[in-house]
Amino acid sequence: MFAKMLVAVASIVLLPAAAQVPAPSAVQDIDLNALNCGDFLKSDPEAAKRIMFWLAGYYTYEDDTAIIAVGKLDGKERQLKQYCADNQSLSVLDASAIFMDKKFNN
């Protein structure tokens, strides 16, 4: 009896809190081989950040330090978006190489 009462009280107390938690958005895979600049520009800011973090790892060399330079990454995102605005049919991987890959930036 006490256990049922405890569960009922806990349900009443926790139900309003559960109702306030936003439902997780649908997680979608992102195929960067197929993603063009136009689609990248239309992506939500959170997806763009995830893409930029992936690109940062993709363009990291073995001798690079294990530091995520967030400010630098934000700058790279702005550069990539500006370039993509003028080249919307270009692949994001091709466009990002211009700004992210050391072999192009030395």
Image (cartoon, grey):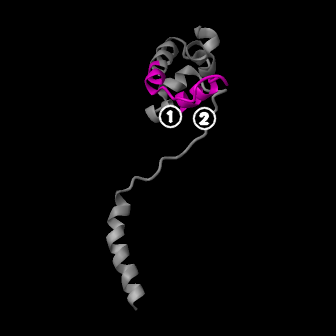
Front position in the image: 9 or 44: 9
Q: Element under label 1?
A: helix
First in residue order: circle 2 vs circle 1: 2
> In x, y percent, where is residue 40?
53, 25
Give the residue at mark 1.
Answer: 47
Q: Is residue 102 above or below residue 3?
A: above
Q: Quadrant of residue 59?
A: top right
Count up the numbered dots. 2
Q: Are marks 2 and 1 in contact (CB under 8 Å)?
A: yes
Q: Which residues are magenta?
A: 50-75
Crowd band around label 1 with a 10 angstrom C-alpha radius: few (<14), some (14–19), many (20+) = some
> In x, y percent, where is residue 7?
40, 80
Residue 38 in the figure: left or right of residue 10: right
Residue occupying the point 44% across, 23% down: 74
Give the residue at mark 2.
Answer: 30
Residue type (three-letter) at the residue carrying disc 2: Ile
Task: Tell me, yes or no, whether the highlighted magenta stretch contains residue 84.
Answer: no
Q: Element under label 2?
A: loop
Q: Is residue 37 above or below residue 4?
A: above
Residue occupying the point 51% across, 13% down: 83
Task: Tell me, yes or no, whether the highlighted magenta stretch contains residue 52.
Answer: yes
> In x, y percent, where is residue 97?
61, 16
Residue occupying the point 36% across, 68% down: 15
Residue type (three-letter) at the residue carrying disc 1: Ala
Mark 2–mark 1 distance (CA, rounded to whole Å): 9 Å
Q: Is residue 75 above or below residue 32?
A: above
Residue occupying the point 37% across, 74% down: 11
Crowd band around label 2 with a 10 angstrom C-alpha radius: few (<14), some (14–19), many (20+) = few
| Number of the label disc, if any, that sits on residue 32 | none
Which quadrant is the C terminus positioned in?
Answer: top right
> In x, y percent, where is residue 6?
37, 82
Residue 36 in the figure: left or right of residue 9: right
